[in-house]
Image: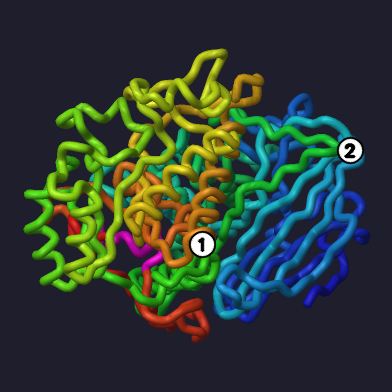
Amino acid sequence: MTVTLPGLEDDTEQRIEWGNDVVRVAIAHGPHTAPRLVALWHVGEGRPDLAGLRRCALPVLEVAVLGDGRSGTSGKRHVGGAAGQRMRLVGTKEEAAEGPDGGPVRRLLLHLSDPDTGLRATVHYELADTIPVLRTWAQLAADRELVLDHVTTGVVSGLGHAARWETELAVWEAANPWSGEFRWRRSTLAERGLYDVGMVRFGQVGSKNRISLTSTGAWSTSEHLPMGLVEDTRTGRLLAWQVETSGAWHTELGDRYDDVYVAAMGPTAHEHQWAGHLDVATGFSSIPVSLAVVPGAAAGAEATLGVMGAALTAHRRRTRRPHPDHDTLPVVYNDFLNTLMSDPTTDRELPLIAAAADLGAEYYVIDAGWYDDENGGWWDSVGQWEPSTTRFPDGGLGGLIDRIRAHGMRPGLWLEPEVVGVRSPVAHTLPEEAFFQRHGHRVAEWGRYQLDLRHPAAREHLDTVVDRLISTFGLAYLKLDHNVDIGPGTDAGTGEAPGTGLLEHGRAFLDWAGSVMDRHPGLVIEACAAGGSRTDAATGSVFPVQSVTDQQDYRATPPIAAAAPLPSRPSRPGSGPASAAPWTANSSPSPWSRPCSPACT
């Protein structure tokens, strides 16, 4: 329920309080102030000091317009956008909706307007009952041509209120190196370089430093996970953020009026060569960000982290695309790691097929190399995706796939759809606009060109390839890999910002993958990018299976497998969200995950 109460800052300011049974938000607004998120809290931790938190509260929409910039000296921070400060609330709406899993959700829509620039926005807050996770994004439009430098609704301030936040707040972040994924570390803010410089008492906002995590390029998780946690060591309270994109993103923590904020967002002008173009005909939807909060558990930090993991898992399950794989949880064998390593032949495959069937595998996936007639020299020639004529005697690839079926398993193939080798005939038959470009040159990386899935010729090419393979071989499984990071993006030959091209391509790729599953109901598609380089929530919401790592040493895989459920979406028997029990400090999470080995997805 939405209520308006007497002012916090002056007699004209009001407050909206909204939420579900476990999490609440308070928003201050008025004719003289932008709508500001004063507090986000769990009902199990008691009501916050709203009056005390008002001073540090940031706008619900942090946005900066090119030529307008930020208000005040914010340094490199992505807060204080002048347009965001001028926004005023012009209307609200509450609505009931249906989530991707079919479950009910409730939304609060805040309609905002900036009279100076003509910028208009609708901020969406979304909650599902029993889950303490607030999902938020904005839809923006303009009355005239505008260019955005950054935009996000994933902002929450007031962290560490009344604390010595240098040492009493800790940030959890995860490095995500190739073959060594999910390496979490915990640091105090001072250990990460954010200090209280004492300037608030002299009329300043605070320091100009920030703790910054940024990912560039097409691998959303190649260096860091797009998520993290802030721990209040006084109470054990955890607040988590999750940026839901398969491309570039940025997160920062900074101090503001003796409290701390976190701002999580998609690409920005400063970090990613991005620009958001708006006019009367073109709008923009910001990257969704989810914010979760749980109180400290009496049993300690480990128990609190378990409750947070359970909450994030429930949220990811409810936002995923429905697929039969979520319920059946089949065992999948892949022939790559520690076995054929992109060098399949009939003689090598047959004993593996028999062994996999004997072990109870239900799917058998032939990984890279099934198209290779160059004895391993295929890296820069891929793109046609035609079966090898030399590797599979006695019936070719189709005959080998028949043997997979004869052993009671369903067949699958590996594919790297987004790339075309520089020596591939496809590189010369598709139009130039179907590839990533910058400054009049086609972008190449490690002998590959990158397709731009916004272009109809690129999409038609991939549709033809996939439909041909499925109809010819009766495939039930595709593993889609991506092994080059193509840089900041594409200007599409039109001079658009490269970061804009990358964001739109990433969205188009996920849309294309969904359309393939629509055309081929029951087809299982695995998401992979050099192992775990796209372990993000946007990818996980579309693909039913997520590749985790390329690690080959069995002794190094247990910590990766153990840490995987926190950033990803572990599957479990049954459908829909996890347990409907309330997410409180005493909740016991039920972490379900499918068994995994280096050769078993």
Q: Which residue is mark 1?
A: 239
Q: Secondary structure at mark 1?
A: strand
Counting residues from the N terminus, which is met first, the one under dot 1 or under dot 2? 2
Q: Is residue 347 above or below residue 310?
A: above
Report the side of 7 relative to 449 (left or right): right
Name the mark on residue 469.
Answer: none
Query: Can you give x and y, in whole percent of width and height, for residue 254 in the image?
Result: 56, 43
Q: Secondary structure at mark 2?
A: loop
Tell whether position 170 is magenta. Answer: no
Report the side of 42 relative to 403 (left or right): right
Of 189 and 22, the residue lying toward us:
22
Q: Which residues are magenta?
A: 558-570
Name the mark on residue 143.
Answer: 2
Q: Residue furthest front?
A: 395
Query: Can you give x and y, in whole percent of width and height, for residue 162 in the image?
Result: 58, 59
Please report the residue visible at 40 percent of the width from the left and 30 percent of the height from the top.
420
Quarter of the figure with the C terminus: bottom left
In the figure, residue 419 lies in which quadrant?
A: top left
Crowding near the residue tagged with mark 2, few <14, some 14–19, many ≥20 C-alpha atoms within 10 Å = some
Q: Residue furthest top?
A: 440
Please report the residue visible at 11 percent of the width from the left and 58 percent of the height from the top.
352
In the figure, residue 157 lies in which quadrant?
A: bottom right
What is the spatial separation of the Cα atoms under label 1 and label 2, in whole angstroms? 37 Å
Please report the residue visible at 66 percent of the width from the left and 63 percent of the height from the top.
39
Tell whether position 561 is magenta. Answer: yes
Of 32 and 462, the residue lying toward us:
462
Please report the residue visible at 53 percent of the width from the left and 45 percent of the height from the top.
253
Mark 1: which amino acid?
A: Leu
